């Protein structure tokens, strides 16, 4: 399942962290790398979680707190860092200013801009849970949230690209006014020149799966396994239906039931910011793809679209006992329906930590991320996520975190995780 929860026992996480640390020690024996490697690994685990559902960081922090009081050196460093961060945040809290969430007019304007441009995921703005910063001409915007010492923008700026540089500088000035660091999360390669020109450093955090719908077809030998999966699902009684927004309200109670059971099974609470949440006003404003069994809805996905012919799958939820071919059927039939409707591109979302280089000249951030991707499977299904999305032969496009200032973006990544999880309570919560 794509929105898989990553909670495990503390001991399992400890073993995964030890495996990553052992790999790093074999690569570099000098003890001078131990502290930055450990801190960076923590941030990368947290960031990978944030890219998906924010559930990883809870058990990881619990394990870290154990070591604070059992490891003389590492524990002392961790405790000193924690005290410093908390003290600094408390001292600056008085000076921080938080803008009000957007009103109906600003939200309507931003939703209209998002619909006219090519990033369908920018339709998440309609949730109304993010602050908005518009360009001076009003034709582009940045959506963002504040957490800790970070002012975090989600995705590339939305609007014509020639407006990006001035808008990013305006964003940086606003962050400095609030005594916050400017951060951009899940940005594309197109944004990197603007980031560098405005004094921000990029860090790769994974890859996004994008399907060219104009070329999508199940014909040919490469698709045999997928054809068998969906044929078996349909023989066993599953059926697909694409609901336009006006047809969603009558089935909202059923969708809510599926969503509640899915969250309960995953031991997770609703996340936010870079992920949609099951809110009736949000879900009924989008097309929804559903799978039925004997007339009962057993799985669904809502879809964000643009006038440019691009689409993005947001919420993807199913009953705990759903047929094993349910999601294969949902994805394939959804792609076919979108293609028939004239859409040209479908965004399947991120594969966290995918595609990070591990060569000797790669940045430390990339090498640690690669080790986490390779050895952290016991505690988060990194490879499984990529394998599932790879079934559909997507183009893998890199995604980055960009941060203003110097040093590894440890604190910024943790702030992003807390922003998505709704704070420590949301991150630690088990349903």
Image (cartoon, grey):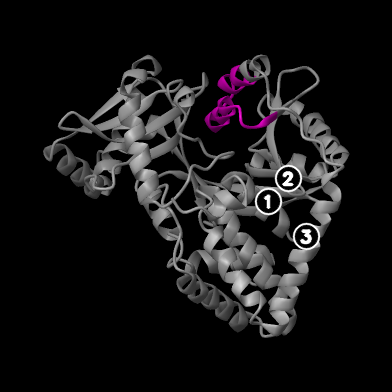
Q: Give the total number of marks visible in the rendering.
A: 3
Q: Which of the marked residues, 1 or 3, is nearer the chain's N terminus?
A: 3
Residue 107 vs 426, above or below: the answer is: above
Q: Position of residue 33 (x, y in %)?
A: 71, 77
**Res 392 visible:** no
> Relative to 31, is 304 on the left or the right?
left
Q: Is residue 47 magenta?
A: no
The reply to whether dot 1 and dot 2 touch (C-beta < 8 Å) is yes
Q: Which of the marked residues, 2 or 3, is nearer the chain's N terminus?
A: 3
**Which is more toward the observer, 220 or 406?**
406
**Mark 1, residue position:** 415
**Mark 3, residue position:** 85
Neighbours of disc 1 within 10 Å: few (<14), some (14-19), many (20+): many
Disc ID at residue 13:
none
Q: Position of residue 167 (x, y in %)?
A: 78, 30
Q: Is residue 127 magenta?
A: yes
Disc ID at residue 183:
2
């Amino acid at each position: 399942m794509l929105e898989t929860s990553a909670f495990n026992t503390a001991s399992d996480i400890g073993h995964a962290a030890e495996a990553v640390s052992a790999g790093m020690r074999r690569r570099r024996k000098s003890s001078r790398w131990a502290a930055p490697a450990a801190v960076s690994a923590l941030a990368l685990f947290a960031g990978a979680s944030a890219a998906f559902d924010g559930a990883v960081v809870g058990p990881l922090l619990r394990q870290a707190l154990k070591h604070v009081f059992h490891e003389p050196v590492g524990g002392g460093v961790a405790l000193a860092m924690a005290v410093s961060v908390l003290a600094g945040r408390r001292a600056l809290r008085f000076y921080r200013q938080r803008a009000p969430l957007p009103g109906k007019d600003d939200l309507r304007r931003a939703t209209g801009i998002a619909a006219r441009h090519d990033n369908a995921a920018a339709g998440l703005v309609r949730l109304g849970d993010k602050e908005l910063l518009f360009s001076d001409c009003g034709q582009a915007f940045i959506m963002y949230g504040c957490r800790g010492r970070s002012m975090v923008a989600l995705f590339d700026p939305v609007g014509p690209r020639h407006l990006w540089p001035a808008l990013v500088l305006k964003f940086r000035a606003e962050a400095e006014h609030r005594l916050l660091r400017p951060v951009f999360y899940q940005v594309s390669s197109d944004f990197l020149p603007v980031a560098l020109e405005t004094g921000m450093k990029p860090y790769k955090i994974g890859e996004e799966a994008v399907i060219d719908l104009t070329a999508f077809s199940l014909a040919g030998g490469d698709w045999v396994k997928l054809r068998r999966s969906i044929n078996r699902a349909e023989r066993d009684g599953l059926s697909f239906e694409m609901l336009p927004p006006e047809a969603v309200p009558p089935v909202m109670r059923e969708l809510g039931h599926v969503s509640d059971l899915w969250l309960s099974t995953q031991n997770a609470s609703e996340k936010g910011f870079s992920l949609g949440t099951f809110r009736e006003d949000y879900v009924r404003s989008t097309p929804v793809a559903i799978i039925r069994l004997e007339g009962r809805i057993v799985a669904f996905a809502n879809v964000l679209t643009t006038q440019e012919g691009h689409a993005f799958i947001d919420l993807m939820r199913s009953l705990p006992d759903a047929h094993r071919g349910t999601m294969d059927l949902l994805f394939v039939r959804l792609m076919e329906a979108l293609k028939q409707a004239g859409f040209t591109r479908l965004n399947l979302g991120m594969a966290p930590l995918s595609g990070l280089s591990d060569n000797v000249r790669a940045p430390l951030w990339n090498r640690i991320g690669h080790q986490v991707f390779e050895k952290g499977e016991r505690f988060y299904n990194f490879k499984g996520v990529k394998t599932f999305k790879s079934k559909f032969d997507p183009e893998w496009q890199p995604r980055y975190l960009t941060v203003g200032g110097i040093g590894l973006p440890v604190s910024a990544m943790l702030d992003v995780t807390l922003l998505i999880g709704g704070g420590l309570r949301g991150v630690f919560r088990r349903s």
